[in-house]
Amino acid sequence: MDNKIKFVEFPVIETDRLKLRLITKKDSRDLFSILSSEEVMEYYGAYPMRDISQAEVLIEKFKTSFEMSNGVRWGIEIKGTNKIIGTCGFHNWNKKHYRAEIGYELNDGFWRQGYGEEAVLAAIKYGFNEMNLVRIEAVVYPENIASENMLKKMCFVYEGLLRKYAFFRDKYQDLNMFSIVK
């Protein structure tokens, strides 16, 4: 298998209700609105944003990661609205081992409506078919039952507890490892 994939242009994915697209500076206010919420950020691994400039920096980070072929992060837009309600995508892309970690978050006003699952399923399909991934991982706070249930519904398998796996919010955090394989 050859996995020397290099992104050429940003992929846009459409589902029944959603458009997964490039996040640009014009999305700064929407992204800030999402990531300044304590409810959203509780399990994100960071404190809520306090200033829109933090959203602008994150958008630039997503852009650089894509340009370096290290990952891809889509803005999740309800078709026709031209506003993002969340993001999803891949980071920690290990091309040698054909795996990447998926991450996602939604504005809490759009929780429990199936948007997260719809976006993540589209990203998974892209990862397996276009990025040549064989394994997609997700690490989740053990307390984030909603995220764990969504992953299980999409056939992710719980692999175990990663003790003190990350240093988030000024302390070491345990995370649960889930994966899905092609």
Image (cartoon, helix red, strand yellow):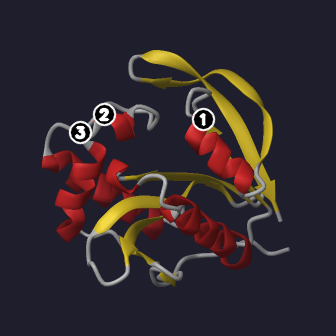
Say which amino acid is labelled 2: Glu
Q: Amino acid at mark 1?
A: Ile
Residue 145's disc number? 1
Q: Residue at x 72, y 54 (%)?
A: 153
Residue of label 3: 49
Taking depth in this image into account, of 67 and 77 the one nearest to the observer is 77
Q: Residues within 10 Å of mark 2 (few under 14, many from 20)?
A: some
Residue 45: x and y in percent read: 44, 33
| Marks 2 and 1 in Cβ contact (< 8 Å) | no
Image coordinates for residue 29, horizontal then vertical, percent: 17, 58
SS for dot 1? helix
Nearer the camera: disc 3 or disc 2? 2
Q: Would residue 87 appear left or right of 31 to someone viewing this image?
A: right
Q: What residue is shown with label 2?
A: 38
Q: Earlier in the sequence, mark 3 or mark 1?
A: 3
Given the image, on which type of amino acid does mark 3 rest? Met
Mark before the other along the chain sequence, 2 or 1: 2
In this rendering, the answer to whether 118 lies above or below 136 is: below
> Residue visible at 30% across and 33% down?
38
Nearest to viewer (mark 3 / mark 1): 1
Disc 3 and disc 1 in contact, CB within 8 angstroms:
no
| Residue at 35%, 36% in the rendered image | 39
Q: Sort mark 3 into few (<14), some (14-19) or many (20+) by Cα contacts within 10 Å.
A: some
SS label for mark 2: helix
Say whether residue 157 is left or right of residue 108: right
